[in-house]
Image (tube, rainbow, N blue to C red):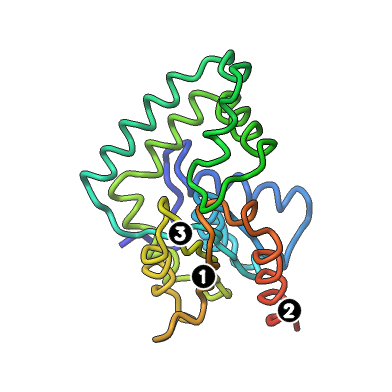
Amino acid sequence: MLEPNAIATSRYAPAAYARDLTVLLEQLELSNVWLVGHSLGGSISLWAADQMPQKIRGVVCVNSGGGIYLKEEFERFRAAGQQLVKLRPRWLCYLPLLDLPMSRMNVARPLSRHWGKQRLLDWVAAHPEAALGTLLDSTTESEVHSLPQVVSRLQQPVYFIAGAQDTIMEPQYVRHLASFHTSFECCGNNVVEIPDCGHLAMVEQPEAVAAQIQRIVTKHES
């Protein structure tokens, strides 16, 4: 078992990003904060809450879960991801209509073409070393299995918002990770599932996500 507040040595592991986040909070002199993280950002938020419990009031993970390592699926994901990182010349941004498939990828309903274009720009502009390092370091067997241990240690409130039609982080995997926190109990009290929603909940259903976050934070106001 990992020791409490263990920091991964890898530069691009979620725990390393969390350490950068805690440094930022210290520089900004912020405390008693809620962290809201999407997908991998949720994992980073959980690690940050573990590393700096005195500053993190609570965590809300959006489309974020896991803790189960499926060897063949992860190997396929890593191989495909490596190819996507390598094969992304900047001229892709100028191809007509390429924003259309990006507006339909991993969502329950198509996004506006504006968001499709933005996703394309973000994909092309991502730093290659960081993109590849993050992909590989966040999907190892040890990394996947360490996340439930982190969640089980957290004393702060931890909530999970899932998309009912999320094919990247299916609700069952969200609930699995959520079940390691004491607030899960027997009924999944710390999990909210948004219907007709895929992997980009904050873009697909912004009002619903904002309402849930507001409800959670208000519930824990002193």
Report whether 133 appears left or right of 203.
Answer: left
Q: Which mark is residue 184?
A: none
Q: Give the quadrant of the N terminus.
A: bottom left
Look at discs 3 and 1 and give the one toward the viewer. 3
Q: Which mark is residue 193?
A: 1
Query: At x 51% / y 57%, what residue is drawn?
Result: 63
Residue at disc 3, secondary structure: loop
Residue located beneath label 2 in the image: 218
Query: Relative to the observer, which residue lies in front, 124 or 207?
Result: 207
Look at discs 1 and 2 and give the one toward the viewer. 1
Look at discs 3 and 2 and give the one toward the viewer. 3
Q: Give the quadrant of the C terminus.
A: bottom right
Q: Are marks 1 and 2 in contact (CB under 8 Å)?
A: no
Rounded to the nearest whole Å, what is the CA distance between mark 3 and mark 1? 10 Å
**Mark 1 belongs to which amino acid?**
Glu
Q: Which mark is residue 165?
A: 3
Check disc 2: other Cα within 10 Å, few if <14, some if 14-19, many if 20+.
Answer: few
Residue at disc 2, secondary structure: helix
